[in-house]
Amino acid sequence: MGLFSFLTKEIAIDLGTANSIIIHNDKVVVEEPSIVAINRTTGEMIAVGKQAMMMHGKTHENIKTLRPLRDGVIADFQAAEAMIRAMIKMTETKKPLFPPSLKMVICIPSGITEVEERAVRDSCEQAGAKDVRLIHEPMAAAIGIGIDVLEPVGNMVIDIGGGTTEIAVIALGGIVCNKSIRIAGDDFNTDIMEYMRKQHNILIGERTAEKIKIEVGSALSELDNPPPDLPVHGRDMMTGVPKEINICYSEIAHSLDKSIIKIEAAIMNALEMTPPELAADIYRTGIYMAGGGGLLRGLDKRIAQKTRLTVHVAEDPLRAVARGTGIALKNFNKFPFLIK
């Protein structure tokens, strides 16, 4: 620690489509949904994170809630910058006399374009960062899981987030081959909303779909220890009156099937692209899963059946990418895969 270390603040950000996590001094200091509430007339930000999420789907004409990130990339530049700024402010316990210069590592999807990468960097710089490094999400997930990414051993990592599913084979501190598809948690929510509309003639919102996915979501129609049925409230499309129905996990497994098939196809595609020596390593080490999608019941078993490989789910998969980003921050100038 230098004499003027208080003038520099080091933070690692997992800027996700669904949730954003900030790590400072090896601790998770902010974990909030990636959503903002904005006053339509003045354009000022009213709430961010959990507060904005509580307003989502319940706003009047003067307030709008929006998610600045779509499919893992910034869709609304100004809202993203305001959200990053507000979340960085949440990390401050007391107001500093001199605002510190920020040193930041932020993770990005591996299938991102140069323009989208520039947007992330610019948003961070506008939010006050002096030194920004980027790291690809599958690489951050691998580090967060505890894999030694610098070894000459192939490891396959699947990171299913809110907006994108990242599949990458990692060896020697780099991504050898990767596949990034824009099918992930948000698409699961859309599938559930569509299923409820078509099968039960009931309209539900995004928040309810997310709750169904967490409470009774499943990738398999038969589970060893199934969750209890969930009462769901929504609007009846025939009468327009609110009503309640009970939903079981096998119905949700059926509704998510087409999205999961696309993820399985992407995994098989990534395995086909893998060099033979690394494929031999993957046979021994198996596949590692991270991200919120890793929490979906039975998804690891389903991928294991499809690939005939062992599938390991990271402990606390939601924070695996953030943990890896935090480790990368500590090795700011050492790791070769941090993009300057």
Image: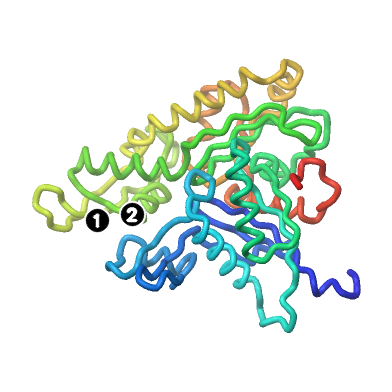
Residue at the image point whose x is 47% and y is 40% from the top: 184
Residue at the image point whose x is 38% and y is 31% from the top: 257
Q: Secondary structure at mark 1?
A: strand
Q: Position of residue 247 (x, y in %)?
A: 28, 46
Residue 208 numbered mark, or none: 2
Q: Secondary structure at mark 2?
A: helix
In this picture, is 205 found above or below 36? above
Residue at the image point whose x is 49% and y is 30% from the top: 263
**Residue 143 placement: quadrant:** top right
Classed neighbour count for the residue bearing mark 1: other residues with Cα under 10 Å, few (<14), some (14–19), many (≥20): some
Q: Is residue 80 left or right of residue 65?
A: right
**Residue 4 placement: quadrant:** bottom right
Quarter of the picture holding the N terminus? bottom right
Q: Position of residue 202 (x, y in %)?
A: 20, 48
Question: Looking at this rendering, what residue extends furthest in the top direction?
Answer: 276
Q: Is residue 232 visible?
A: yes
In this picture, is 194 found above or below 16? above
Q: Is residue 135 left or right of residue 239?
A: right
Please state the total of marks drawn on the protein image. 2
Taking depth in this image into account, of 43 and 286 the one nearest to the observer is 43
Q: Which residue is mark 1?
A: 233
Q: Position of residue 283 (x, y in %)?
A: 69, 22
Q: Amino acid at mark 2?
A: Thr
Residue at the image point whose x is 76% and y is 47% from the top: 340
Q: Is residue 302 left or right of residue 108?
A: left
Taking depth in this image into account, of 78 and 332 the one nearest to the observer is 78
Task: Point out the tag, 2 or 1, that comes first from the N-terminus.
Answer: 2
Asked whether the residues under the numbered discs 2 and 1 touch, taking CB atoms below 8 Å apart as contact, a structural biologist would say: yes
Classed neighbour count for the residue bearing mark 2: other residues with Cα under 10 Å, few (<14), some (14–19), many (≥20): some
In this picture, is 57 found above or below 178? below
